[in-house]
Amino acid sequence: MTVTAPPPVRPPTGSQRLLAAPGPGFDDHRHTHGPLPLVGPGTIDEIGRAGVDGRGGAGFPLARKLAAVAARSARASGTGRGHDRTPVVIGNAAEGEPASRKDAVLLERAPHLVLDGLVVAALAVGAREAVVATSDRLAVLVRRALDERATAAATWTAAPDPVALDVRPLSHTSFVAGEAGALASAVAGGRGLPEDRVVRLAERGPSARPTLVANVETLAQAALVARHGAAWARSVGSAGAPGTRLVTVSDVTDPAGAVVLETAGGAPIGELLVASRLDVADPRRTRAVLVGGWGGTWVPAAALDAPLDVDGLAPWGAAPGAGVLAVLDHRRCPVTVTARIAGALADASAGRCGPCVNGLARIAEVVSALASGRATGAVAAEVQRLTALVDGRGACHHPDGVARMVRSAVRVFRDDVQAHLGGRCLHAGGAR
């Protein structure tokens, strides 16, 4: 049988890139994106020039992660020892963030782009295997995509993947399950909990091998850059946020009704709220937006003109994080909403360190007392004291996120805090 090369495929234009294919199937994927090119030593540099950053929350440059794992892999291969020291690549689709839906949408609509990204990352660092770690429901979709690729390779309609791809259903997808160390532990058969780490994952993960953990959107972006290059990737977006990104817009009190958008990087927050078409996201009624996720930062309505990128959000002390815009409208009491989120995040603790077990519980207790009208005295000073005690001291960054969210609430909702201290609520019907 003669295998014919597929026709050239034009790069997607505009801001529909990740979600450009009309369907999730392998044929739609190939017709839209074409085959992966050869991945060589220059691929990591090209990803760096494209500005691909982490989309799981931290925003760490992917190229730096790849380079660190590749360097460790090269050193390990020269030791001559018999132990397997080849790297492991993990696609993070745990999405324990309650206000995010983007990873689920990506796996539902473009699973093959994620799998291509795993291949690119694995080849770039010298790995022979890569895995997507996700929920039971989404694992079924990834398995279906893997079966499609295997069938295409068996019938000679597509080349086989050059690395072994797999999917790992997670037993739980709690808020902290998506932390890189916890996810690597789960994939290696461990408890799947954050741990204090002396050695970086790039040096040695739970499997004793160099480990790369990257969000699935980040990997999908890498698959596009490997095909079309950094200049194409930067042809949309802002200088500080090149390319596109997935954004989840929701009512902060009802994440289940979230809408996921693909947008050019650096789009103004207000424009994204309008594009979501959610009633709660009408900028005329928006009181504030929780940017980045539940462990993100509250910004006031005055920030709606700010671009959703690091530079645009810096004056507000915020960052894009996981691309979450959770909207609070004028009908809800911000103190009560903050108290509920703080309580939920305290309950989500993995119980691995004092800042989580004790600090977050105490922070949630203080904000709950404020919301119910039981707080007295200098609440802002107490919040500052407590958040300073947990900042940077946890086994993971979960306590840091809670501290950031609560501090920003006290700052942005100053009038509401003072009203609650006086036994009043400025939002009748929304406070209790």
Image (tube, rainbow, N blue to C red):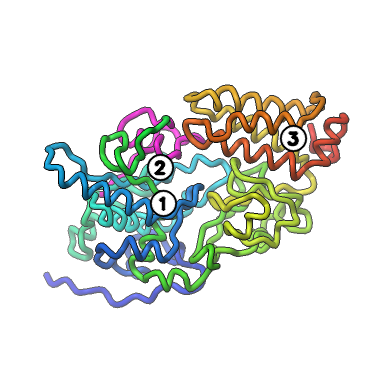
| Amino acid type of the residue tagged 3 in the rendering | Thr
Q: Earlier in the sequence, mark 3 or mark 2?
A: 2
- Binning the other alpha carbons within 10 Å of mark 2 as few (below 14), some (14 to 19) or many (20 upward) gives many
Q: Please say if 336 is above or below 306.
A: above
Per the rendered image, the range of residues in magenta is 165-194
- Binning the other alpha carbons within 10 Å of mark 1 as few (below 14), some (14 to 19) or many (20 upward) gives many
- Residue 336 marker: 3
Picture quarter containing residue 38? Answer: bottom left
Instruction: Examine the structure image and report whether residue 167 is included in the region drawn in magenta.
Output: yes
Q: Which residue is at a point 38% across and 62% down the rendered structure image?
A: 47
Q: Which residue is at a point 54% across and 30% down the rendered structure image?
A: 348
Residue 19 on image: x %, y %: 46, 63
Which residue matches tag 1?
216
Q: Please say if 343 is above or below 280.
A: above
Q: With 258 as the anchor, is 224 left or right in this view?
A: left
- Mark pair 1, 3: CA separation: 33 Å
Residue 156 on image: x %, y %: 18, 64
Which residue matches tag 2?
134
Provide the secondary structure element on which disc 2 rests: strand
Callout 1–callout 2 Cβ contact below 8 Å: yes
- Binning the other alpha carbons within 10 Å of mark 3 as few (below 14), some (14 to 19) or many (20 upward) gives many
Provide the secondary structure element on which disc 1 rests: helix
Provide the secondary structure element on which disc 3 rests: helix
Q: Please say if 45 is above or below 5.
A: above
Residue 168 on image: x %, y %: 33, 40
